[in-house]
Structures are given as C-alpha cells and as structure tokens.
Image: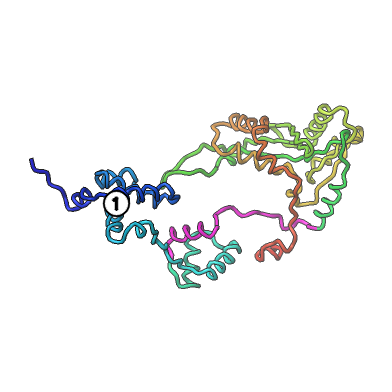
Amino acid sequence: MWVLFSNHEAETMSFALDTNLRKKIEKRRRQERDARLWRRLTALLWLAEGVPDAEVGTRLDVSARQVRKWLKLFRTEGLDALCELRYQGRVPRLDDTQVAALKEEIAKGQFHTARQIADWINQHFAVAYTESGVKELLKRINVSYHKVTGFLWKADAIAQEEWLDDYRCDPVGPSIRRYFIDACHPVWGVEMIYDCWLLVGQRFHVKVGSGHHRLNILGAYGPEDHEYLDLRLSRGNSNGEPFVNLLRLLRERHPKTKQFILYLDNAAYYSKPCVKEWLARHPQFQLKFLPPYSPNLNLIERLWKLLRKEAFCRGYDSFAEMQRGVSTVLDHLEKYHRQLDTLMTEDFHVFHPQDYPECCAASPV
C-alpha cells in the first residue's frame, strides 16, 4: 500500500536532532521564562520525536503553518535566531505630545461619544480613527467612560467650611450620640430603569409603575458606631409627626444618653409646631442644620446612594416587592460592611469656586 505525504509533512517528518543538540534545547527550555519561546523549543522537540506538525500546533494552540515557520527559522538561521523575538509592535499613530493634548481636551468633559473624539483627532492631528480604534486608544491611555459628578452651584463654600469647623468641635463621648438625618423617597416606576449588559440589538423590558407609589424613608445614621435606624411610610409624606417618632425611637434605643446631636437639612417639617413642642420637653436633643444646598455634608446621603445601587439594580413587579427589596438592603447592612467602611467616612468634600468647570463658573440666569 502506498501512502502519499505532502511536501510539508515530508519536511517535518524528516526532521531529527542529534543527542547533544537535543540536550542543549531541553536545557534552554528548562531555563526559559517566556512562554512564547518555551512553545518554540517544545515544538522542535516534539517534531524530532515524529509528532506531526498539525498535532504539535494543536497541543501548543498555534497553527500548523506557524510550527513549520519555526522549523524553517531554526534550520536556516539556527537556535539563537529561533529564540529571538523580532516583533516590534505597531508604531503609535499619535506621539506623546499629541496624546497629552488629547487627554487635556478630554479632561474638559466636552466629548460624549467616541465619534466626537475621532473627529477631534482628525481635525487637529490629521489622523483618521474608526470608533473602535478610538476606544482601543482611550483604553490604552487610561481614559474611561463614566457619569459626571453633579454639584449644587448655589452652595456657599465658606458656609460649608464654617459648618465643618463647628462639626469637628462637637463633643464626642459615651453619653453623647450624634446622627445624620435625612429622608429618601424611592418611587415604584421611576427607580426601576437601570443599566445592564445585553446582546447587540436586544431589548429587555422591565415593568414600571405609574409613579404614584412612593416609599418614604426617614433615617438616622451614627458616624461613631455606624448605627442605622429608620421609619418607613408607604402612605403620606415625611412631615413633623414621623420625625418626632424617629426621635422617640432614638431615645428608646439609647435611654442613658444625655445628649443627642442631630445634623439635618433645612426641610420645612423640622420646624413644625409638633416638633418644636416635643423638643421643648426633651432638651437633650440638639438640632444642627446644614448650610443650604449642602447634601455633600450629610453622610446619610451616601447610604441612600448605596441603597439605590444595590436595591434598584433589578425590576420589581409590584410596590410591595420593591419595599421588600429596600428592606433586603437596609435591614442587612452588615452584608455591605466593606463598601460602607470606604463610603461612610467623615471625609467631606467642599466645592470651592476654583473647582467649578469653566462652563459653570458663572451662575445661570
């Protein structure tokens, strides 16, 4: 029976190594730390054992053609040439000066799409990029796509600094408890839209409500021991009476506390007659109001951010189910202690005029 071999198969089958050369290759392979060169040396040894080039390629996850190229390089130029990596990589299309100029322009926050960046590069440097090419470039130069950070331009930086000075001077001790207080109002049907990865062209529908069902959460957060407690109302608004009930809850939880210092915003219900009357009878409660437009100074606002991230990353078929989703987070904050250790720090950022973007430096009309 006659068996026919192709020229390539015959070439690899006729390959052999003498004893000394094999030992030299084996020693070099043992000392090699670069996986690319290790594969080349291994291919030679397997070919010399009579393993077909296709099988060698399969074992090394390369093509049979690549195996034959390695063999040809070894035969024509020797072992040192085989162990030399000659790939130099692509020449960058933008030099360091151009990349620096691009990053400076990106830092202004004016680009919303990769296409806009590609057009800017073409206009200023006469270099054409596709959208996918721009995305690869941006990843390489450490530029990412994310949401901007909003700020309240009416905030008074001096007033915030003065408030922080006063806050840092507030007494702390075993008979004193401090709390940041605020309300959160997740709405079924508004909070249900979230981001997720989908197949290209796919639409994923999530049930939403009419927006009329709102959960009112009035919470208190203690910065010293990270205690959190709240009142949740599915009907009505957060008026003076729920706030008084929250104060009662604080007093019941810590009956031996001689002074409660509460930090809160300027919501109207804190000045309701029922609140004033209750505070007059319980002088151990001291209310300290934040400067106007200063949610950045209220620690509990960060907890609401965590709540929205964890509880509203999915849809809910009913308002009651949404309430259970909220409870899953707020009633089990111990599950998020790693996030809270980083998030709930007394590191307050104050926006100064020099921090404002140029487009926002002037107050809007």
Q: Is residue 290 above or below residue 330?
A: below
The colouring scheme, among rainbow, by chain, secondary structure or one colour, is rainbow
Q: Residue furthest front?
A: 20
Assess whether residue 73 is covered by the magenta stretch: no
Residue shown at 61% from the left, 29% from the top = 324
Assess whether residue 141 is covered by the magenta stretch: yes
- Give the magenta part as a residue range: 129-157
Q: Quadrant of the N terminus?
A: top left
Residue density around tag 1, few if under 14, some if 14–19, many if 20 or more, within 10 Å: many
- Residue where numbered disc 1 is placed: 67
> With 113 as the anchor, is 65 left or right in this view?
left
Q: Position of residue 149 (x, y in %)?
A: 64, 54
Residue shown at 32% from the left, 43% from the top = 59
Q: Is residue 115 shown to the viewer in this render? A: yes
Towards the viewer: 192 or 115: 115
Amino acid type, mark 1: Val
Residue shown at 32% from the left, 48% from the top = 22
Towards the viewer: 251 or 28: 28
Choose top left, top right, bottom left or bottom right for residue 131: bottom left
Q: Is residue 234 shown to the viewer in this render? A: no
Q: Position of residue 144 (x, y in %)?
A: 55, 55
- Magenta stretch, main secondary structure, is loop
Q: Residue furthest left?
A: 1
Q: Is residue 51 above or below residue 322?
A: below
Residue shown at 74% from the left, 62% from the top = 353
Element class at badge 1? helix
> With 209 as the anchor, is 68 left or right in this view?
left
Choose top left, top right, bottom left or bottom right for residue 194: top right
